[in-house]
Image (cartoon, grey):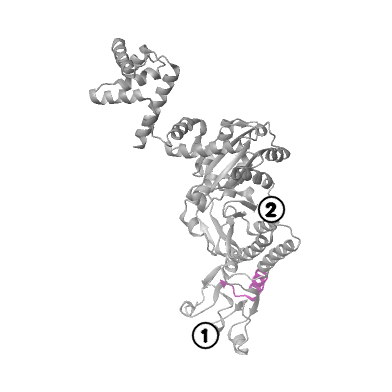
Amino acid sequence: MRLSSVYLYEKIKEKYEILEKGNLSGSDGYLRPFLCCGINKQGKKSEDGFRTGHVYVIQGYDAEEWEAVGSKTEDIFWIFCRKKGTAGFEDEADNFKGAFVCIDLEDLEEIAEFMNDVQEIFDGADEWERKIHDLMLEHAGMDWILRVTSEFLQNPLTVMGLDFTFVAEAGSEYLPLRARLYTDDGLNMEYVNALLQNETYRDMADTHEYVMFPTYISGCRSMNRNLFVDEKATHRLVLTECRTEITPGVICVLDILVEKLEYLLTHEAEEEDPDRDMEQIFVRVLSDRTADYLQVSRELSELGWSGNHEYMCLILQITYLNQQNLSTRAICRYIKKKLEDSVSFLYQDEIVVFFDMTRLGMNQEEVAGKLIYFIRDTYLKAGYSRVMEGHMNLRRQYVQAKTALDVGSRKKPYLWIHYFSQVALTYILEQSTRRLPGSMICHEGLLELKKHDEENETQYMETLRAYLEEHLSATQAARELFIHRSTFLYRLDRIKEILQSDLDDPEEIFYLELSFRLLEQEEEKE
């Protein structure tokens, strides 16, 4: 296995004192070392005296020897051994093209021990590569490959989709809770949102480079590398720093790991989705108005969603951040993990979720409570239908949830969750004025009352509204308006005179109340 000069340097400095170094890189690669006693003798043998792509440990040299190897150093990693305190070669180092380090060694016995140590560095790396190769041949899977690599690098590893879909991980038991992207409850949304708002994270969307994320995002630094399938970034490898410090030296190891992971991702069989059949049934219900509901009911019943169960629909509006970073697949998986008896899918650029409330054994408030913080933290907007029994109302429940989301977002845009029951009256008013404005379908006498107020500066509209809201109680209405009861009764007589009504017909009372709502809605539009 080829090891980078940075990797070798970091391993060597754990045991030996480094006097000088230069031109080190995490992207180069060198094979096992050769030992040479001086440069000149080896360099003068022939132009091919040095094998490129290898490590050379040099015992003894002087400044003049640099010129002899200057043209042969680009693909060789030089390790010079000299006694601390002897003359260095700082001036000549500028002309040196290859990677090099100088260590505090001079005695041949010490150098021989050093050679053994370097060989052990290569032994460890080769052993890791052999294990990875064997696991690939055995089709052991990505989890085992990450486990072996995590033990080798002494830090946790995770592979996830760019939409935060979990793929595989190893060593997560060493991570603090805050730094775990995946918990028993699903995605760690605090971690996800910190990433989504980080500029470095957004900028690495298509890069092949390794990118370090700072500690403040999750509490631990991490090195991240996109994984590509068919030249498109689809997944990400994350090495999290919690046991040992992450340095550029690990790149040569991760490069090999990335190659293996991309191969697995390219050739892995598409995972069967157990909810695929149910999802297709619901898509047919929503998209085909001529669908045979009896057939739909039979198919759902065969899957355990009985016709006498209660159901509820939820629609999630996907925001800009979700479209860019957090895909529908990740959101659907989260909901499925939290509420097993549900089916989630993308329909007309929104996420639609149906819940079997009977199988869940929960009511609307309990289901919504399970998702409330997830919806808020992922910047989603949600609309809930009513809970209804049977399969015949599934499409109508979708319309209810859609209405809750649309009407609620317009009327109260500062809320992220809306329920159909809360917007039903507004929906009725909007539907009743689709062809004619409120002023043309409201109680005609109410228009006369409004005109009288405008011309005579009276307050009959306010008085009548209070009377209706207090359930035709003159005493309560007078108290609400802060006027004497006799004053209120005088106003009420004038109102009845203008309306030409005794205000004792329940239907007319309802019509007047509805008319007030219609006029208010018209004023809001203006």
Q: How far apart are the alpha carbons under marks 2 and 1?
A: 60 Å
- Residue assigned mark 2: 271
Q: Is residue 216 visible?
A: no
Q: Residue furthest top?
A: 486
Q: Decide whether the magenta segment is chiefly helix, strand or loop.
A: helix
Quick one: label 2, few (<14), some, or many (20+) residues within 10 Å?
A: few
As drawn, is 337 to the left or to the right of 84? right
Q: Is residue 114 magenta?
A: yes
- Residue assigned mark 1: 67
Q: Quadrant of the C terminus?
A: top left
Q: Secondary structure at mark 2?
A: loop
Task: Give the amino acid at mark 2.
Answer: Glu
As drawn, is 518 to the left or to the right of 390? left
Res 254 quadrant in image:
bottom right
Quick one: label 1, few (<14), some, or many (20+) residues within 10 Å?
A: some
Residue 80 x, y percent position in the rendering: 57, 76
Q: Quadrant of the N terminus?
A: bottom right
